[in-house]
Image: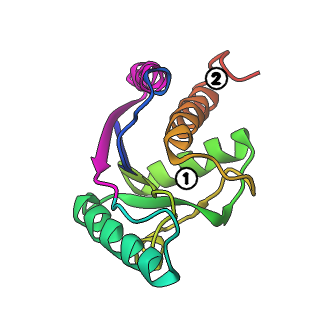
Amino acid sequence: MINVTVIAVGKLKESYLRDGCSEYIKRLGAFAKVNIIEVAEERCGDNPSQSEINNVLAKEGERIEKKIPKTATVIPLCIEGKEYSSPDFSKLLENVTLKSSHICFIIGGSFGICDSVKALGSYKLSFGKMTLPHQLARMVLLEQIYRAFSISNNSKYHK
């Protein structure tokens, strides 16, 4: 069975997001073993300087790097990543699982992901040019992973 790890900065604060993520994790159980790892969000003021932002990114990046499974194929979510249709994302995951039994997705915090973590990615994923709150991005990611596995397994979920 495929292992899917999602490393995310911050905790899910809203119950509707926790419920949605739980539902997709439950559904994914038919295809993969899912592990969610939350790393602490670094705090900073309301109007941070670029230096403060870089510091936040570096500290969150260190926390993320410590949690990445050694054998996993890493896929960070970032604005400069590639956009995929759902069928193409399904094909990507099929190709990844031919080479690795562990996929690790990374969702950064409010300022994104530091360059050193992005550099670990075999692929980079983007949900488009729109900015999503990182907590919502987690639920969207889990739904798209479920959809991808459903497509690969000829399920009726994807129409």
Instruction: Identify which amino acid the numbered label 1 is placed on.
Output: Asn
x, y percentage for residue 110?
A: 50, 57
| Magenta stretch, residue numbers | 18-41
On screen, residue 137 versus residue 61, left or right, reads right
Q: How is the image coloured?
A: rainbow
Q: Is residue 37 magenta?
A: yes
Residue closest to the eye, 66 or 16 = 16
Q: Quadrant of residue 140?
A: top right
Q: Is residue 79 left or right of residue 71?
A: right
Name the foreground residue: 91 vs 68: 68
Residue 63 occupies quadrant: bottom left
- The structure residue drawn at horizontal position 64% and vertical position 46%, both measured from the top left corner, is 89
**Which residue is at a point 40% across and 33% down the rendered structure image?**
13
> What residue is shown at x 43% (from left), y 65% (from top)?
45
Residue 21 left/right relative to 81: left
Provide the residue designation for mark 2: 154
The picture quadrant where one finds residue 1 is: top left
Tell me the tag on residue 95: 1
Q: Nearer the viewer, residue 26 or 45?
A: 45
Which mark is drawn over residue 71?
none
Is residue 148 placed above or below 78 in the rendered structure?
Answer: above
Query: Residue 102 vs residue 53: left or right?
Result: left
Circle 2 crowding by C-alpha within 10 Å: few under 14, some 14–19, many from 20: few
